[in-house]
Image: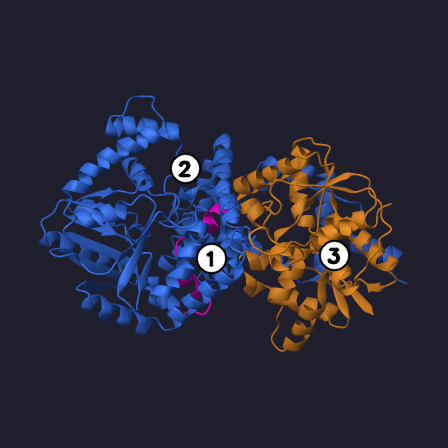
Amino acid sequence: MSELNIERDHASLAEDFNKDEKRVNWHDKTLWFIREKRDKAAWQIPEWEQLREHASHIKNHVLANLYDYLLEFERKAKENGVIIHWAETPEEHNAIVQSILKKYHVNKIVKSKSMLTEECHLNKFLEQHGIEVVDTDLGERIVQLANEPPSHIVLPCIHWKKEEIGVLFHKHLRTPEGNADPQFLTHAARVHLREHFLTSKVAITGVNFAVAETGEFVVCTNEGNADLGAHLADVHIACMGIEKIIPKRKDLAVFLRLLARSATGQPITTYSSHFRKPRVGQEMHIVLLDNGRSKRLASDDFRNALKCIRCGACFNTCPVYRRSGGHSYHTAIAGPIGSILAPAWDIKKNSDLPFASTLCGSCSNVCPVKIDIHNQLYKWRQEIVRNGYVSTKKKVSMNFMELILSNPLLFTLSGWIGRKILTYLPFIVNNNFNPWYKQREMPIPPKESFRSWYQKNKQH
Amino acid sequence: MKIGLFIPCYVDQFYPQVAIATLQLLEKLRLNVHFPLAQTCCGQPMANSGFESLTSGCNLNFINSFEEYDYVVSPSGSCVLHIKDHLHFKGREQESENIKNKIFELTEFLTDVLKIENLSASFPYRVGLHQSCHGQRGLHLSQMSELVAPSFSKTEHLLKKVKGLELVALDRKDECCGFGGTFCVAEEAVSVKMGKDRVADHLIHNAEYITGNDMSCLMHLEGILKRQKSNVQVIHIAEILIAG
């Protein structure tokens, strides 16, 4: 794949992940359990499918009127005393955040989970500029201590076993060696994080929904860490993609019902916190990022992906994700949705991801806002090939295949040759150069093809 | 009623018994069935690999082969879905649209068009049904486990009419087997793991046969079963519906 400028592609990283089959089984079962919880939660709502349809309509409406809604949101937020920033690129986004931090002379911030800051690689940027970032979401903190990116947008450390977390905490938080009791470890993390909460002047949060009508934004967490961070800090910076807008507060009645049920099977997240105006003495900033979103908005094929509410349901249901792990996607957002988002950010670097799927379609079916993920995967494949991000080997074999499959005579002849090879010279295909044969037997060749049988027996 | 039999390229070359069973099944129902000899492939292997641009030859060949028939029937959900979603050729738009509307996967044709009530088939074995994704989620041959909606299955409906057949329940009713066209070699490790898990779900429920609407998935599962030296066999649904 060096030709494509991908250091390690999904297939090769997934192959590594599959070297420990027991771990793959564990990973698969853990995520499948969440998919089943999601199913149970969905079945509690008889109007589930209408709710998805409704959410999809609202999002489509927002995307069709995004310009107006963004301006409305900005106006209302400013009226509320919030400072609004617009960033076109991740670099601009990071520079804006840094300039705010500079003003307050801080060398540490607390951050609650935000996939947008992952998208911008904010942690790395701030650390390079001497600012310590403390992720306060427990899962996020675990992967941060391990110096890893999250492997899942909702369950960032789903690839870690509790025993391994015990070892990690022993090293970093000085918990007793060998203690892997989740309650104990959570308490240790709580004590450790509390100190950071109390000593941080600036808190960064993500945004789940930004309400145009009121200028408020909603952050959904289970741990309350976004609230603790924002309430204790002098400055609250909320980072959001421009697609997070919803028209009215009442629309939350649709999205909050869908989000947690789709994500983890909970009826609702423990905290759905509304932030509208800074409290007295506090400063509140919202940074709105484009990063290719407005370009995508213009694309009939790919616009739909902007409806995403980052629930992660497509991860949990994806049979490939469950058996390849989040890191095999080598991008901030893994899984099926990541595979259709990442090529827009960097088509060259992520040209392997739309192929990391069987196009089974389960992702589109669980999506609470009805993004046609599997169709977009198909369309990205065409786009990638059209732009030449494909190996010469694949190009040659596809042209060869086309030549044979579009010509009845060549097709019949090659079928005959193929059957003869399998019958008389099986070693030509039954070897390690044939990826099929590595762990699977080849089909036993029949004496004749159907067309040959048909000509003999049926044609008069 | 003139029926064009569309046999997927790999079935024609490697699983002729599936094509013969399909033909015999339709002829048993007193239908006038033809196999146009110029047919080759629906173009899906190229298209799913990102080379839809290379499918015009296959598309034209497909249109020329099947435009004259009242119905096109095929023992494959995947290939039928590909035609329904992607068949096109400049200047032959109307013919493409006509074919998209008259092409049916075999079990869909039996239940929706012929509405058959009785089958004189008998297959006294424990059978697991691998409901392939394209037939299920693409053609809606059965309800999908992700949706909050009443369950149905055209495939099971037919299997339940087969004398002696015992359908085994699986833990994961509609999990993908990992075949996925070129995915099966490009992502060999994940593809095989998915296949092994799919096979294990059938084995744990003591299935003697694994059946389905798509021979491609079954070929992948068969490769794994044979490598495991298992006695469990794969069999296309057409072969069951004509058995006994």
Q: For the residue carrying disc 2, how many other residues have a C-alpha within 10 Å: few (<14), some (14-19), or many (20+)?
A: many
Q: Specify the colour of chain A.
A: blue
Q: CA distance from mark 2 to mark 1?
A: 24 Å
Q: What residue is disc 3 on?
A: B107
Read off the chain for label 3: B
Residue visible at 39% across and 43% down in the picture: A155
> Where in the figure is residue A138, as x and y percent of width and height?
31, 39
Q: Mark 1 against mark 3, which lies toward the viewer? A: 1
Q: Amino acid at mark 1?
A: Pro
Judge whether residue B40 is colored magenta: no
Say which mark, if any, is on residue A159. 2
The C terminus of chain A, quarter of image: bottom right
Which of the 4 image quadrants contains residue A135?
top left
Q: Which residues are magenta?
A: A298-317
Q: What residue is disc 1 on?
A: A368
> Where in the figure is residue A366, as x and y percent of width and height?
51, 54
Which of the 4 image quadrants contains residue A294?
bottom left
Considering every residue shown, the one lying at the far top of the view is A177
Judge whether residue A303 is colored magenta: yes
Co-location on one chain, circles 2 and 1: yes
Look at the numbered discs 2 and 1 and tell me whether their residues touch, using CB distance below 8 Å. Answer: no
Look at the numbered discs 1 and 3 and tell me whether their residues touch, using CB distance below 8 Å. Answer: no
Q: Which chain is orange?
A: B
Q: Is residue B89 above or below residue A239?
A: below
Q: CA distance from mark 2 to mark 3?
A: 41 Å
